[in-house]
């Protein structure tokens, strides 16, 4: 029994010592938080990236608008001429119009994929810059951990540890080409 008690006391002592070191290490840890979405929305490079995306979206809408109006024009013509066209001519025109509709849908899907890739690329460039700035700030200010402010991951964070404004300020001082 005494051997068991000695072993238990030894294990408990080691555990307490380990917890003491962990508590001391956590007490010395410097923690910060960054709202990356706000950095993207408020920083100069984030706004530039969004502007580039909006320009691409406008071009895509214009192109798709042209395709759609062309399709609708041909459909309206077919509706007007359907009474005077022969059966085979009417079928040919309907088939051509159906192909035009499929082409429009394919173009729409292609544009969505291109815009998603462009979004990923533009925002990816911004995120890369944000990560570099956060690392620099963490190194210079001695942060042990920097977390992304995310409602799913961080339930609460004091504004005292929020370095989002510092990240935005640092990014805005840089001359970064997107």
Image (tube, rainbow, N blue to C red):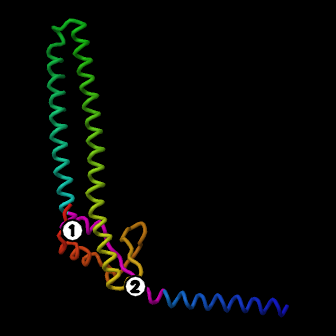
Q: Quadrant of residue 28?
A: bottom left
Q: Quadrant of residue 164?
A: bottom left
Q: Quadrant of residue 126?
A: bottom left
Question: Depth check: 66 or 135 in front?
Answer: 135
Residue at image location 38% in from the left, 83% down from the top: 143
Quadrant where the N terminus is found in the figure: bottom right
The residue wearing badge 2 is: 30
162 over 3 or under it: above or below: above
Residue at image location 38% in from the left, 68% down from the top: 151
Residue at image location 18% in from the left, 52% down from the top: 54
Residue 43: x and y in percent read: 21, 68
Whole-angstrom CA distance, mark 2 to mark 1, is: 25 Å
Residue 74: x and y in percent read: 16, 22
Q: Earlier in the sequence, mark 2 or mark 1?
A: 2
Crowd band around label 2 with a 10 angstrom C-alpha radius: few (<14), some (14–19), many (20+): some
Residue at image location 28% in from the left, 55% down from the top: 121
Quadrant where the C terminus is found in the figure: bottom left
Residue 94: x and y in percent read: 24, 17
Crowd band around label 1 with a 10 angstrom C-alpha radius: few (<14), some (14–19), many (20+): some
Residue 68 numbered tag = none
Magenta range is: 26-46
Q: Main secondary structure of the magenta part?
A: helix
Question: Depth check: 27 or 83 in front?
Answer: 27
User: Comparing marks 2 and 1, which lies closer to the viewer?
Assistant: 2
The residue wearing badge 1 is: 42
SS for tag 1?
helix
């Amino acid at each position: 029994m005494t051997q068991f008690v000695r072993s238990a006391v030894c294990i408990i002592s080691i555990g307490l010592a380990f917890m003491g070191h962990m508590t001391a290490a956590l007490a010395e840890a410097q923690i910060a938080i960054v709202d990356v979405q706000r950095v993207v929305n408020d920083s100069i490079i984030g706004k530039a990236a969004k502007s580039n995306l909006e320009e691409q979206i406008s071009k895509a809408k214009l192109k798709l608008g042209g395709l759609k109006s062309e399709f609708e024009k041909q459909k309206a013509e077919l509706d007007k001429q359907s009474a005077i066209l022969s059966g085979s001519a009417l079928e040919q025109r309907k088939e051509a119009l159906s192909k035009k509709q499929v082409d429009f849908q394919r173009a729409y899907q292609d544009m969505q994929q291109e815009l998603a890739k462009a979004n990923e690329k533009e925002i990816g460039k911004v995120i890369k810059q944000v990560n570099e700035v956060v690392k620099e700030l963490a190194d210079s200010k001695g942060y042990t951990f920097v977390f992304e402010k995310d409602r799913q991951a961080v339930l609460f964070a004091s504004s005292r540890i929020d370095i989002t404004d510092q990240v935005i300020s640092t990014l805005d001082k840089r001359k970064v080409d997107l």
